[in-house]
Image (spheres, rainbow, N blue to C red):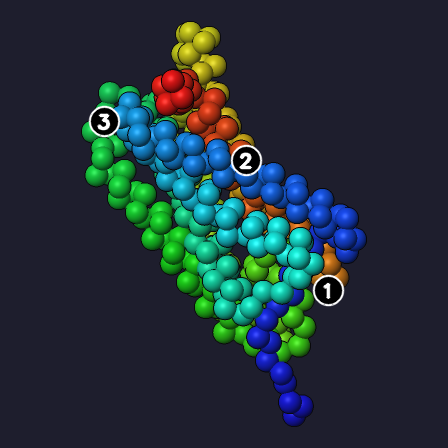
Amino acid sequence: MANLTMVTEFLLMDFSNIGELQVLHAMLFLLIYLVALMGNLLVFTLISLDEHLHSPMYFFLKNLSFLDFCLISTTVPKSIANSLSHSHFISLMECILQLFLVIFFASSELFLLTVMSYDRYVAICQPLNYEVIVNKGACVKMAAASWLTGGLFGVLYTVSTFILPFCSSNEIHQFFCDVPSLLRISCSDIHIAPDVTIAIGFSLGILCCISITVSYGPIFFTVLKIPNVEGRSKAFSTCLPHLFVLMLFITTAAMSYLSPSFDSDSVVDLLLSVFYIVVPPTLNPVIYCLRNKDVKTSLKKLIA
């Protein structure tokens, strides 16, 4: 049997091999990152400081902002630094940590978004019982369950991926360490553990989608019965953006993880990852909070 050299570092893929385009990519990612950073930190700060925003809905939005900040900070700064330095290496330990954190934060966000849909269901369909059902203790438990489940998935995905041997190619066809790209370069043809883990994650993702659908069905039915046009518009403006970002997040992540592996570099893979790693953390502060009247009032009080 031939001797195999185990991989101790990986080479991340860039969006272009042209130096000028690498700098352009770095500047674009830096701009997006700064927008996401300022938006999420602003939302987190406003909700933390303003007592009028200490309600269940804003408690979940505060958690979402922190998750978004962590998720985009796990991948984008490294990609920016690699593009500017023209060095795309990432060590084995950095790759392991990055994969764990990406799965941890992304999974936690999916479960938290599911919890938020239930919160909106109770608020709109059972307003008289809202404070009883979604009390402080229930909020903490649901948020904690989202974080703990995300951490569990982070461990499962990371362990099942890195128990595989990497002994030949170290070129990851992605701008960060993710499961599909790592499976593609593994020198093992048998991926039972990662496949089982992905299947479990996909199944729970479907359950989350079903739960969200079950929550939003009665919401839309209730909203349509509101006689006031302004009231209906306000309710839809709260729910529809939530659904849009959620569907974008779920569909692009599912397409990335369930699509067949290709031996050649695929720009589509890079774009899909941008849509579930970069876009939601950038849009969420605007969609959920900065368009919100209460948050705007809190921001004016902070500035004044």
Q: How far from the left and from the top, in percent, is residue 87?
A: 66, 62
- Residue 175: quadrant of the picture: bottom right
Q: Is residue 282 above or below residue 156?
A: above
For the residues labelled 1 and 2, the Cα–Cα distance comes to 35 Å
Residue at which label 3 appears: 131
Q: Toward the viewer: 158 or 115? A: 158
- Callout 2 environment at 10 Å: few (<14), some (14 to 19), or many (20+)? some
Residue at which label 1 appears: 263
For the residues labelled 3 and 1, the Cα–Cα distance comes to 54 Å
- Disc 1 versus disc 2: nearer the observer: 2
Q: Is residue 2 left or right of residue 59?
A: right
Considering only order in the chain, which callout, 3 or 2, is on the residue closer to the N terminus? 2
Q: How far from the left and from the top, in percent, is residue 33?
A: 56, 41
Residue 176's label in the rendered image is none
- Disc 2 versus disc 3: nearer the observer: 2
Give the residue type that dot 1 points to. Asp
- Residue 60: quadrant of the picture: top left
Residue at which label 2 appears: 35
Considering only order in the chain, which callout, 1 or 3, is on the residue closer to the N terminus? 3
Q: Is residue 158 left or right of residue 279?
A: left
